[in-house]
Image: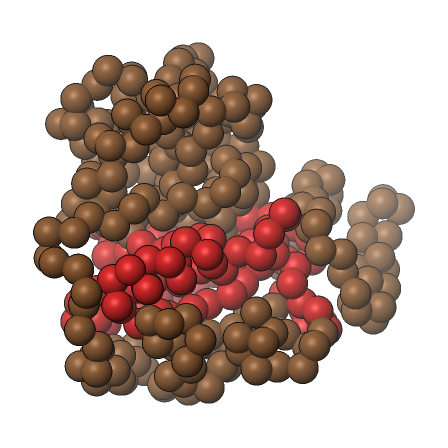
Chain colours: A red, B brown
Amino acid sequence: MQNIPKRFRLFPLILIVNFFLITQSAHAQLAPPSGSTYGGSVPSSRKVVSGIAWYGVLADGLAEAKRTGKPILLITAAAQCNNVPGMW
Amino acid sequence: MEKLLGVREGTLPNTVFCLLAPDGKTRLTRPTRGPSAFRTPENLALQMNKMLQQYRATVPDSFVSPIPYVDRVDLALNVAASDNRPLIVAFGSDEKELVAINRKLQPLVWDPNVIGQFMYASTTDIAELKVLIGKDKSPGIFVVEPDEFGVSGNITQHASLNAESDEILTAIKSGLKAFTPFTKDHRRHISNGYTFGIEWETVIPESDPMSVQAKQRYKARFENR
């Protein structure tokens, strides 16, 4: 992804951010996949890797944080690179 | 978002990482491009645990959070492909059916074996399901395996509208077990996207002229082949 001003090259219609609520003690996850891989799952593996339950809509996540009193991990990103979808 | 993260107008990076207080306004960390400031995942976990001590949950442990839906099915498909995860789509022919589906699905989303493994989308518009490939598109819950680019997805499991919670959970777990993540190479992914004409146009137009020109030059290499 390229660094550009007004880099809201995010989803159509509204700004979408990914973030999750810190619900309990955060355990470090497994190391990211090595090699020419991309994504959150471990390729060629039958093992289920612990995931993060992202709120994909900013408003929903903020509302949930207010309702539960939990702090927020906020990550914004565009699910496209050079206009090609399927990759952050 | 610019105001939230305290950046000048028009200068928000396209990836931002930040920890916020529950009010959604108070920054607990300086916004950065990623979590690398924490150096290691273990340190990030340690610092997050420290921050957690300052806050007390205002809901009981039995509280079930809402399903973290993405706004549209095609959007959720793209995100699922980017995250290399399967997608769950809840489809009802009307709002009443969707509410009934959500009531059964909501506690399952937070099941320890399911949490964080899926993206979620819901709709009452059957037209949104055109990106999904499968014979049975009757109301219910679909487990979807996105393609590499997140522009279509195969329905691998379907639980009907009248399915009980344990049937739905079985379908979800089966879909998760059968899911095979892609091995993606960044350069090849972009190259293939241009070769196959797969593009995602954003509603917010690109504003950086240098970036626009760079992309045009890159794409021209494929159009002239």
**Residue closer to the observer: B224 or B138:** B138
Residue B139 makes an appearance in the image: yes
Q: Is residue B142 above or below residue A46?
A: above
Q: What is the quadrant of the C terminus of chain B in the image?
A: top right
Position of residue A14 measured from the top left corner of the image (x, y, whole percent): 60, 52
In-image side of B192 versus B51 (left or right): right
Which quarter of the picture shows residue A55? bottom left
Q: Is residue B113 above or below residue A87?
A: above
Q: Is residue B205 above or below residue B225?
A: below
**Residue closer to the observer: A57 or B3:** B3
Position of residue B208 measured from the top left corner of the image (x, y, whole percent): 79, 69
Residue B145 makes an appearance in the image: no
**Residue closer to the observer: A80 or A17:** A17
Identify the residue at image location x=83%, y=71%.
B210
Identify the residue at image location x=39%, y=14%.
B138
Which quarter of the picture shows residue B185? bottom right
Position of residue B194 measured from the top left corner of the image (x, y, whole percent): 72, 47
Identify the residue at image location x=17%, y=45%.
B111
Which quarter of the picture shows residue A81? bottom right
Q: How many marks?
A: 0
In-image side of B180 versus B8 (left or right): left
Residue most toward the right? B224
Identify the residue at image location x=47%, y=58%.
A58
Q: What is the quadrant of the N terminus of chain B in the image?
A: bottom right
